[in-house]
Amino acid sequence: MSGHSKWNNIKRKKEGTDAKRAQVFTRIGREMAVAIKEGGADPVANSKLKDVIAKAKANNVPNDNIQRMLSKYTSEGGGNFESVTYEGYGPEGVAVIVEAATDNRNRTASDIRHYFDKYGGNLGAQNSVSWQFERKGVLVIDRAELEDEEDDMMMIAVDAGAEDFEASEETFEITTDVDSLGEVRENLEKQGYRFIVAEEQMIATNTVKIADPDNAAKFQKFLDMLDECDDVQNVWHNWDEE
């Protein structure tokens, strides 16, 4: 979970422990449950569910696990899970969005408020910080798996419908309009490309530095605690960690 898809965060996902992988599987299962509850169990008719399945594959969830999740939550009609979003500020004005999938709103709200209070932040009202972010589709490809040069990959991404393209030493990162994520992903999949990230993200339109090292350490602990919370799906922030 991060403000953006930095390579070190992606690498941690790829090299995570069994416990972390199990946590990722659980979170994707909950996301699948919410998608089924909101739009039905047919991925062809439910683009959100189709995107969650693609996200599962990008996170190396085995096909057998995906099918078991689909069967489970289809039979339960999505179960009791619902999507809920919290917004607030961390130390020194860092904007934070927490996306959760919960079967108990009161429990989750209490936990999230506790984390904000404990680590020097404050929980705000809905839309109090979301105006500082844009929801985008993000696809990330590991350059080590490709022979494509940067310019060639950029043209391929643009032709597939991408909105933006960024290259680093380790990855190609493709940004799309959120409604075009599935279409761009499918266009690239047909050409044989695989992704280490394929999901919607909240991209900060501005970043904030934390000047006090103690506050920076406190905010990192806050992020770690959210990462360990079973109900939390994603955390987006505008902290400039560099």
Image (cartoon, rainbow, N blue to C red):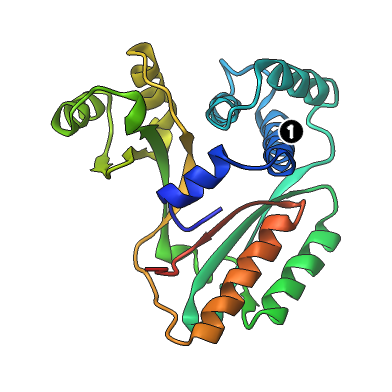
State the residue in front, 93 or 214.
Answer: 214
State the residue in front, 225 or 130.
Answer: 225
Q: Residue furthest left?
A: 151
Which residue is at 53% across, 71% downward? 128
Is residue 5 in view? Answer: no
State the residue in front, 123 or 127.
Answer: 123
x then y, percent, for residue 77: 81, 27
Where 31 falls versus 235 (above or below)? above
Is residue 25 in view? Answer: yes
x then y, percent, for residue 234: 60, 51
- Residue 72 is left or right of residue 157, and the answer is right
x then y, percent, for residue 62: 66, 21
- Residue 182 is left or right of residue 220, and the answer is left
Q: Quadrant of residue 122?
A: bottom right
Which residue is at 27% across, 45% downward? 168
Would you name the residue on which mark 1 appears?
33
Where 78 falls versus 23 (above or below)? above
Q: In the rendered view of the protein, which quadrant contains the C terminus?
A: bottom left
x then y, percent, for residue 53: 59, 25
Which residue is at 39% across, 75% downward? 208
- Residue 202 is left or right of residue 169, and the answer is right
- Number of numbered discs visible in the structure rendering: 1
Which residue is at 41% across, 47% downward? 7
